[in-house]
Image (cartoon, rainbow, N blue to C red):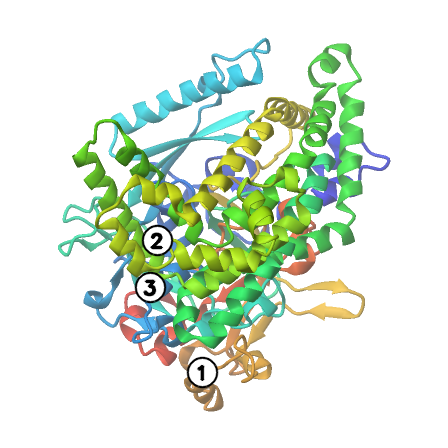
Amino acid sequence: MRKLASLVLGLSLLLTFSTAKADEGMWLLSLLKKQNAAEMQKMGFKLSAEDIYDINNNCMKDAIVGLGRAGRPFRHFCTGEIISNQGLFLTNHHCGFPSIQSHSTTEHDYLEDGFWAYDKSEELTNEGITASILVRMEDVTKKVLSTVNDEMTEDERYAAIEKVATEIEKATEEASEYRASVKSMFEGNQYFLFVYEIYEDVRLVGAPPQSMGKFGGDTDNWMWPRHTADFSMFRIYTDANGKPAKYAATNIPLKPKHHLPVSIKGVQEKDFAMIMGFPGTTNRYLTSFGLEETMNITNQNRYDIRTVKLDIMMKDMLKDPKVRIQYASKHAGSANYWKYSNEQNKALTSLNTMAAKKEIESEYNTWANKKSKRTAKYGDALNMIEKSYADRKEVRYDMSFLSEALLQGAEMYMFAYRSTGLMKKLSADTLDQDAIAKTVEGLKGSAKGFYKDYNLSTDQKLMAALFAKYAENIPAEKRPDIFKVIAEEYNNDFEKFAAEVYSKSVFASEESFNKFIENPTAEVIENDMAYKVGNSIIALYRTISGEMDKGAEQLRKGKRLFVDGLMQINKKKNLAPDANSTLRLTYGTVGGYSPKDAVIFKHYTTLKGVMEKEDSTSHEFKVPAKLKELYKNRDFGQYADKEGNLHACFLTNSDITGGNSGSPVINGNGELIGTAFDGNSEAMSGDIDFEDNLQRCINLDIRYTLFIIEKYAGAKNLIDEMTIVK
């Protein structure tokens, strides 16, 4: 969007939008032929739009996997790509990290040592992980909006849309064996139906050691140059008929409709490259008012609070191997957007995105007020947005602190709160023993997963520190009621209070929980200190949520009209909707960049850089002995370039965001050349404001991936499955 604002001076908004280049945009596959194919072919794409998306024939979309979780399969957290006719797929190491961590113990530390299945019988199951493959998509805007009108309130409009969308989803699923989801585009001005086949048996096949898969750690995260082997491998299984099924020993590997051939020919500067995946969320149409909230509240509070949280976890992780395994995934998940928030604020400030947003809004108002009829519909949109953000400023600040410091802080008291349902059943006038027994079994099941990755001492430290951080920033009258107890009975000594909670709560240890759950009573739950803490926090959360909802209707309406206006202005131009976890394609070229004066980054890195970064005193820059030996002997096999160097990572100017992690980078022939895994810090503004001169996607070179699989891990069985293009 930056290139739009940069030309606003002296030009109309219409001209501004028309200058957008192809490398900005996360495009819908069904519209590629109309919107993008010709431009892609000029840039080096040698196939057709139908080779990417065709509902009647096998095509590239059939090889793209959206990773989700049971119960939320449409909220894809990462992307994968199928690379064999046996359902084998690649994704990022950080996407597979929770699965790798869940299988790790101090005896079998797959985080430290890596994991490789040299036979399908050795592959590990991952309950709760789903893999979605798009069957088709359809523009259903007319159907969805058929019952709405301008006289409706925004809530009435929303209810009418939800009713029709649900009917479409239900009818689609009843007429097929697939799952369906209707998704909003352009702030509720357009709607698409997405139909998926969702697989539930996804097994871990391989992953390098954490020292390679997370090489550089938080220091290198979002940075270039990069040397991270950020990949892991999974396999989709089906029932005997090739249909989705829950795990069973008799399940068989998926026989995909298409798998991507893997090219080891390498990449050159200016080569065409496209990325297909499931980008999570962008906010390109965010106003200056929303930007202020994002920078000053969301990003700043997230960074400040997580700094405290991450420091506590890391200190304990470095002291104890068991804690390191228990908190590895938690730390990684929290750290990713901790650094992102800080780097995004820096980029937004450096690029003066606020001014760019205000220029677009000024031009929008000029257009909206040019004709009286237009003014009546669109003229008040920005005023509604501004007022909504202003009215919710304080409550949004309160909510961000509550969420980051208390809801997502220490874990034990929130686990204790899960017993609310059991307490109510045990307090009923007439006891339903079957319901009680079922609830008890559910809690026992949850407890196994919770205590496996829980350390009492670490959690207690988190509670004390984050409660103190919360109290420093939120006035006493706005805190959960439990803080009154801490003030009156513990003189605001949060360490003393935390020590008391963790010494007395039946939820503080697995041993005390197991003893309690064998003969649970409502009285014990109700009087438990941890339960009281969790209950108090949830009570305040509900209150603040209600306050947040008060201005939501006007904000939704203002955003819808603002974006509708932009679409009207540019109705003859191609605009891409914001990312929303649906399958998209972005394209561009391979190339380096210059982030500042006298600094020029080339478009690739090599294994030499890994050795140059090695630091045996840092847990982030350790290099395995075997990798050093392979480097010393120049034993790169068929994966070296003409000069004998092994490439590690490369850059494209593709438009990606979170959710694209693990997405395939595909050349003009439809062959896999790498996997996307990160963006660059200088353009962390990209989710809000695309900067085409700086925006880069950091990709793992497929040759480095294959080298690790074959030469480092010795998993030639996996290489043999693939279609290698030399």
Reply above or below: 409 against 223. above
- On the image, the x and y values in percent for residue 381 come to 70, 22
Q: Residue at x 47, y 57 (%)?
A: 500
Badge 3 or badge 2: first in the primary sequence: 2
Amino acid, disc 3: Thr
Q: Amino acid at mark 1?
A: Pro
Q: Which mark is residue 672?
A: none
The x and y percentages for residue 157 are 52, 16
Query: Seen from this angle, which residue lies furthest top?
Result: 151
User: Which numbered tag is attached to residue 624?
Assistant: 1
Give the mark toward the camera: 2 or 1: 2
Identify the image quadrant of residue 101: bottom left
Give whichever of discs 3 and 1 has the lower sequence position: 1
Tell me how far mark 3 sits from mark 1, CA to CA. Answer: 29 Å
Q: Quarter of the image containing the N terminus?
A: top right
Q: Secondary structure at mark 2?
A: loop
